[in-house]
Image (cartoon, rainbow, N blue to C red):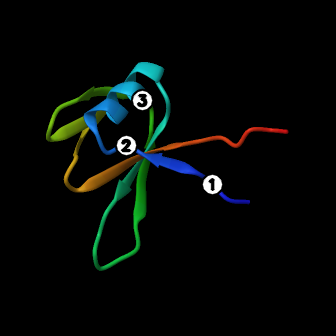
Amino acid sequence: MSNTYKVLSTDADLFTAALAQVQVYVIQKNKEQPDCIVDYCGPIREYTPDFVNMGDINYRRAGFEFRVHIPKKAF
């Protein structure tokens, strides 16, 4: 079974995810190691050009990737 994700890379993506109140995966990007899921946070509370705030934690946008799960449609 394969999972499909949307990477939240633009302000518009982050705004849409914050408005929809979806759960967001926080992925730590590391050139020397595979990507690592740091947290499966709640919805985005606030974002700036440098940070994304979820819960009580600020994540630096340059060091992390933010993803949402896209469910498959049942046929």
Q: Label 2 is placed on what type of residue?
A: Leu
Element marked by disc 1? loop
Q: Which residue is mark 2?
A: 8
- Which of the two labelled residues, at mark 2 and mark 3, occupies the earlier sequence position? 2
Return the mark for residue 3: 1
Farthest residue to the right: give it: 75
Indicate the quadrant where residue 69 lies. Answer: top right
Q: Say if 2 sits above or below 25 in the image.
A: below
Q: Residue at x 49, y 34 (%)?
A: 23
Indicate the quadrant where residue 52 lies. Answer: top left
- Which of the two labelled residues, at mark 2 and mark 1, occupies the earlier sequence position? 1
Q: Residue at x 26, y 34 (%)?
A: 11
Q: Label 3 is placed on what type of residue?
A: Ala
Farthest residue to the left: give it: 50
Q: Position of residue 65 (x, y in %)?
A: 33, 52
Return the mark for residue 17: 3
